[in-house]
Amino acid sequence: MLKGRNFYSVSGLLAVVGLLLVINLLSGMFLKGIKLDVTADRLYTLAQGTQNILENLDEPITLNFYFSEKLFSAKPAIAAYGKRVRELLEEYASLSNGNIKLVVKNPEPFSDEEAEAMHYRLQGIPVDVAGGLAYFGLAGVNAKGDWRGIYYFQAEQEEALEYELSKLIYSLTNPQRPVVGLISKLPIDGSAANAFVEKSREWFILSQLKRSFDVKFLNTDLARIPESIDVLMIVYPRKLEDKTLFAIDQFVLGGGRVLLFLDAFSEADVSVDKMTKAVDNYSTPIRDAIPRKLLDAWGVELVKGFVAGDRRAATRIKARIGGLEKGEVDYVAWLTLSEQNFNTTDFVSRKIQTMVMASSGVLRKTGTVDTQFSPLITTSDQSMAIDAASIQFFTSPEELLQMYIPGGEPFVLAARVKGNVKSAFPDGLDGNVVEKRLTESIVPINIIIVADTDMLRDMFWVSFQDFYGKRVAMPSADNDTFVVNALDNLSGSNDLINLRSRGRSARPFIKVADLRAAADQEYRIKERILQEKLSETGYKIKQLQQNTASDVSGKLKISSEQLEEINQFRAEHIKIRKELRKVQHSLSKDIEDLGATLKAINIALIPVLVILVAIILAVVSGCCEAEACRK
């Protein structure tokens, strides 16, 4: 009986191994192109925009993929990412109906492949003491011999991988790029705003725009928009002359598209008149930019003198808390917006994950014009309208928190405006009738208005690192994605829009944020108690000193009552500071405990489940063998 059982066990094991080999062979032959993407954001599935671009290719393209596989073998992270890029390129080639030819090259030092990589200006990375360079880039060449390149694939920017590849292919087949006319009262190009401010680098947002569009700077006092402009981008139109507003009005009425950045309080405005003129009214700041004639004609209002605050979206910054010690505080005027703040039905904002806006204004629809007002970015319903003067005159972040009262309704920070409108200059310019002027829109207007200009500044959404002598940008938010999406959409191309934010592997720790917010609220309450006690005790000491005589030298004599009061204050002060530290310690402990729990689940749970499944299979197999032996 034992020999029979051993025979069945060995034969069964051999049968299982043989079956696995057959299944593996057949799957390699017939199921090679079948994939199952179960990631939350479908990271391994090409977006519809990419598929449209590949289906519409009408000329051959060669993609030369340079990856120094041997030289990168000692770097597992780069090797794994190289495999990911190659597999994605193979997917592009398979869906291109034969129009994309993928050539994989392994450039080694002093080889012909390295010479080609250098010709295409790919970034070489030192990998050994001998000075050998490794390459990880792409060069695409169209039928005319024109080429575009990705100089180095950085794993930190994996969420933009599909967009970069699709943009490269799209640019090879569509060399004519949309022309963006830029009117700006802010130094986006890095020029000095005035004699007191030094010239700086151009803003990174401008560099991003130049990658996808032909950007032409237009004078802020122009009288006519050039016909070559496909879409107009206006940033901070403060004190534009009527002739320029009239030119914009006629451009819009004629079917021109506009991306308009307004601001109730621009922190980037360092103009001379702003710095030197006195404020006529404390509640009326001098940094706003509201072209009221145009907004009135379009049925939109930028609320004057107020910025949007949102406790739920507040940005956490370094600050001195209560004048006692340095720590972090929520700045409710700087908003770090997440997915719930964006309109998911609009092409421009549907894939945005995070944005940072600073002292943003508030947009409203007016009832005077029948236009469609569609919010793209909104705050939460726990927002508060903050007097812009309080920001202008440096109200501290903790003071804003203490005076914060939720209003119970969301604010609109960006919106799309569509519909038929009439001219903002019904009587012409300065009452002079202009020949061939438009008095109403010939097609429904399509305008995107953003109530903040500071979101374009580098400091709020991008940092820079040195990468082997090159200045590499590391975006922390999708501010550039939103702007490029808007210009793409307004210029008429939608295929690339869905590719800009494909999802990220890093996920926010919502539970940790809730713990921090709860502890922070408790901290603020105790801090307020401490401040009240400080003020109360200080007042009492002052009253006692007024009733105290001075000695011969003029110094105040401290009475026993004063000493007792001071000692009581010191004891209370020490007690409350200990409680504050206890709150922070409890916060850290809760977060550490949560992290330990997550680690235990990730490290131990999956292996335990595998072991349980193996035990169950072994038991079932043993029962089947026993049953077979009895028969």
Image: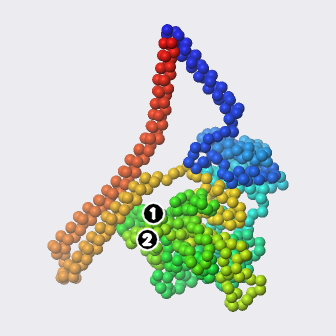
The answer to whether residue 236 is visible is no
How far apart, in angstroms, are the residues tagged by discs 1 and 2? 13 Å
Residue 434 on image: x %, y % = 75, 87
Q: Which residue is mark 2?
A: 407
Q: Residue at point 22% right, 70% down?
A: 566
> Which three-letter amino acid code belongs to the residue tagged 2?
Gly
Above or below residue 37? Residue 325 is below
Foreground residue among 135 and 260? 260
Question: Up-down: is 147 above or below 256?
Answer: above
Q: Are marks 1 and 2 in contact (CB under 8 Å)?
A: no
Residue drawn at x 34%, y 53% as measured from the top left = 586
Examine the image and state in which quarter residue 377 appears.
Answer: bottom right
Which is nearer the eye, 172 or 130? 172
**Quick one: 609 or 370, which is closer to the camera?**
370
According to the picture, the residue beneath numbered tag 1 turns out to be 312
Position of residue 183 measured from the top left corner of the image (x, y, whole percent) = 67, 75
Q: Under tag 1, what secondary structure?
A: loop
Q: Position of residue 606 (x, y in %)?
A: 48, 37
Query: Is residue 352 left or right of 331 when viewed as pictured?
Result: right
Which residue shows up at 61% across the image and 43% down it?
37
> For the residue carrying disc 1, how many other residues have a C-alpha within 10 Å: few (<14), some (14-19), or many (20+)?
some
**For residue 540, which numbered disc appears in the image?**
none
